[in-house]
Amino acid sequence: NPNPTGIINQKMGYVEVPLELSYQIVNKRFGLEFIGGVSTLFLTQNSITMKLEQEKINLGGANNLNTVHYSGNLGLGLKYGIMKQLEFKIEPVLKYQFNPFSSTNTNSKTYIFGLYSGIGFNF
């Protein structure tokens, strides 16, 4: 085939170390808190591959990713007390990333919206 077509796949992985503070606005059966902070992100995965028909070709990694970068985090914490010691939490958080790329010649949006949830047990 003189004009092969393929799919390019880029994977980036990070380990995030957050430092966040929360301010409790409502502390009843239904709770509300404001969350703010910063995170340090360490690059752990950087690969670009191309799938060409039945073959997968490793093209290496992106050369414009900083190995360490930072983000500002802002969100809300919503909790519901199921019992006195058991609560359900959901936290929508917006994270804006600072300097994830070593060059600024990119049109990428450097923010992440996350929706975190879980069950907490207090003793």
Image: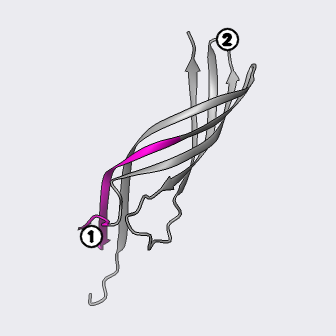
Q: From the image, tell me which residue sits under label 2.
A: 84
Question: Which of marks 1 and 2 precedes in the sequence?
Answer: 1
Mark 1: few/some/many CA within 10 Å (<14, 14-19, 20+)? few
Neighbours of disc 2 within 10 Å: few (<14), some (14-19), many (20+): few
Read off the magenta span.
38-63
For mark 1, what is the residue? Answer: 54
Secondary element under disc 1, as helix, strand or loop, is loop
In x, y percent, where is residue 89? 63, 29
Front of the two marks 2 and 1 = 2
Image colouring: one colour
Who is closer to the viewer here, 111 or 120?
Answer: 111
Q: Could you tell whether 73 is left or right of 30 in the image?
A: left
Quadrant in the picture for the N terminus: bottom left
Label 2 to label 1: alpha-carbon separation: 57 Å
Residue, x 50% and y 49% (percent of image)? 71
Task: Quarter of the image for the C terminus: give it.
Answer: top right
Contact? badges 2 and 1 (CB < 8 Å): no
Type of the residue with mark 2: Lys
Q: Quadrant of residue 2?
A: bottom left
Q: Tell me: residue 111, above or below residue 17.
A: below
